[in-house]
Image (cartoon, rainbow, N blue to C red):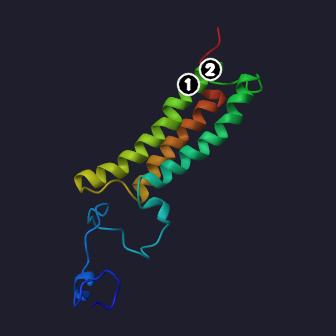
């Protein structure tokens, strides 16, 4: 008889060995306590966070632009909405997914730390510049 229900007698050693998890590719992990924020360790973290924040913020921005409260908008009406859905939200989600998936598929490291921060800031700069008055094309 075994000491645990459903476990074979004398099989306690079988249950103590480490079994590889199918979702754990065995890639090197960033060192804990290496300093910095965990946000910059993996590619999906900043880009998913930025995409979700942008999705919430852009609803108000689009309504303001559509109502004419932003006369300096780069693109008129629904064109701005389509542009930002494609190059703003969707691009951030795809980049976040690929920075995570490529690491799992290939075993190669993807951007982290300062490089990942620079890429996220580049994406953010694109969102801000589209809203700036200097980004507007000359009016005829």
Q: On the rendered image, what quadrant is the C terminus found in? A: top right
Residue 64 placement, left or right of 1: right
Q: Nearer the viewer, residue 50 or 70?
A: 50
Up/down of 28 relative to 97, above or below: below
Picture disc at residue 90? none
Where is residue 10 shown, x and y percent of the image? 22, 91
> Which percent across, then down, holds residue 105?
25, 51
Q: Residue at x 28, y 61 (%)?
A: 22
| Residue linked to disc 2 | 78
SS label for mark 1: helix
Give the quadrant of residue 103: bottom left
* Residue 83: image location, x then y, percent: 54, 26
Of residue 1 and residue 131, the one placed in the foreground of this image is: 1
| Labels 2 & 1 near each other (Cβ < 8 A) | yes
Q: Is 66 on the left-hand or right-hand side of 104?
A: right
Residue 66, by quadrant, is top right
Rendered residue at 49%/32% (across/down):
87
Q: Can you name the residue that lies furthest to the front here?
A: 1
Examine the image and state in which quarter residue 55 appears: top right
Compared to residue 63, the image places residue 95 above or below, namely: below
Label 2: how many Cα within 10 Å (few below 14, some 14–19, many 20+): few
Q: Vertically, is 97 above or below 3?
A: above
Q: Label 1: how many residues lie within 10 Å, few (<14), some (14-19) or many (20+)?
A: few
Q: How many marks?
A: 2
Mark 2 element type: helix
Alpha carbon distance from label 2 to label 1: 6 Å
Identify residue for label 1: 82
């Amino acid at each position: 008889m075994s000491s645990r229900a459903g476990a074979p007698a004398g099989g306690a050693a079988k249950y103590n060995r480490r079994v590889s998890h199918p979702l754990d590719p065995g890639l090197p992990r960033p060192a804990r306590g290496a300093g910095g924020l965990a946000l910059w360790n993996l590619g999906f973290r900043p880009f998913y966070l930025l995409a979700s924040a942008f999705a919430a913020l852009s609803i108000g921005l689009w309504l303001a632009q559509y109502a004419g409260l932003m006369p300096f908008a780069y693109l008129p009406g629904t064109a701005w909405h389509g542009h930002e859905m494609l190059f703003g939200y969707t691009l951030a989600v795809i980049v976040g997914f690929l920075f995570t998936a490529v690491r799992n598929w290939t075993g190669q490291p993807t951007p982290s730390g300062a490089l990942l921060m620079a890429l996220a800031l580049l994406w953010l700069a694109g969102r801000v510049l589209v809203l700036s008055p200097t980004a507007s094309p000359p009016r005829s």
